Amino acid sequence: MVYAAFRSIGAYVPQKTLTNEDLTRMVDTSDEWITKRTGIKERHIATDDEFTSDLGLKAAQKALERSGIAKEDIDMVVCATISPDYFCMPSTATIIATKLGIKNATAFDISAACTGFVYILSIAKAFIESGMKKNVLIIGAEKLSAITDYSDRGTCILFGDGAGAAVISATENKEEAIIDVHTSADGEYADLLMTPNGGSGSAHDALDKEAAGCFMQMKGNETFKVAVRTLTQDVKDILETNNITSESIKHFVPHQANYRIIKAVGDALKMQPEQVVLTVAKYGNTSGASIPMAINDIYEEGRLEAGDLMLLDAFGGGLTWGSALVLFSPLQ
Ligand code: COA
């Protein structure tokens, strides 16, 4: 039997920051309001000539270096993004793979919004366990500033840019394997969080970016309520299915959308503050990049050790949601 193991992590954030104070000069808001409602203090923003693939590339280079696996042995590259370099093609994954010098690997993007990293984790696991692939590089990369409306105070305070990546590889040792990954979606809630125009559903003459409404639009309050309800249930389910109690979780790494959502789900699971990984204050919501960026933070702080059990959970546009029970199993 072949299993999939989580070998390494890497992340990258662009240098420039956008603070709450900066936002008060752009929309009618305040540092106090943003901090109280979201926990966010600042986010990082890419420059005009820095694309999603550039952020993803830097995160992927770190994950590869730390994995101890040669780039020649990577046989699949998957990127989760809702802000790809190009609207239709080429995929961001193919650009990153080529810049890394990875040749002849399967490479493609997926669109699952903020749940993107949990989705690509499940894809890597499935391909490895089926025997089709051995070493999969997964990347969550976002330049959300490119699809954010900086005149809409309901959304522009939330989002930031960044990328995170991980290498998942085959193992015969069940003791080091990813335990489980759940992924779900419900298009009935599609209108809660969307970029309404710009796709094949738009008239050709409405493709001008601003007129076509290619920026994100969100019903924040409803999204908040559905997020807390859905995530709490999903995380309870994955723990129950695998007969694992919340005390055995070393690091609870939720998607970093909003401190209040994280707190509500953490409290429902009776997580202790030291179990909960929080990066929302410094990065904001970076969608599919937020979970690997948060894992990278605890890795670089020396808090993530071989054998640690992580519980991941995420929720996003689609709507999509998911959770995962993952052991950190580095090769080196
Ligand atoms: N600054 C000041 N006031 C703001 C504001 C801002 N940036 N954004 C909205 N407001 C105002 C609203 O206009 C509204 O004013 P009104 O009462 O006069 O109409 C009031 O604050 C309350 O708005 P509401 O949308 O109910 O606030 P909220 O408590 O739900 O907080 C969010 C707004 C967006 C922070 C919150 O709903 C949220 O985080 N939702 C989930 C978003 C999310 O995580 N999305 C991604 C999923 S991956």
Image (cartoon, rainbow, N blue to C red):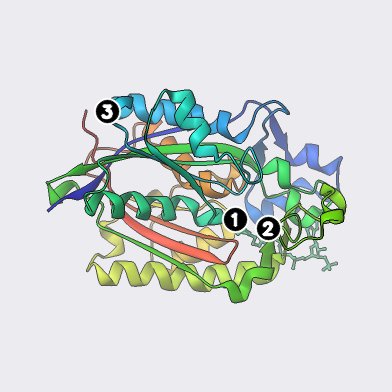
Q: CB atoms at circles 1 and 2 under 8 Å apart? A: yes
Given contact means CB atoms under 8 Å apart, are the residues at marks 2 and 3 in contact?
A: no
Q: Amino acid at mark 3?
A: Ile
Residue holding disc 3? 69
Position in image of residue 250 (x %, y %): 30, 50
Q: Earlier in the sequence, mark 1 or mark 2?
A: 2
Residue at 46% x, 42% y: name it. 294
Does residue 250 appear in the picture of this structure?
no
Label drawn at residue 258: 1
Whether disc 2's CB lies below 8 Å from ligand 1 is answered yes
Residue 331 has which mark? none
How far is mark 1 from mark 2, CA to CA? 8 Å
Location of mark 2 (residue) = 37
Does the beta carbon at disc 1 come under 8 Å from ligand 1? yes
Which circle's residue, 2 or 3, is located before the other in the chain? Answer: 2
- Is disc 1 placed on a helix, strand or loop? loop
Q: Position of residue 279 (x, y in %)?
A: 52, 43
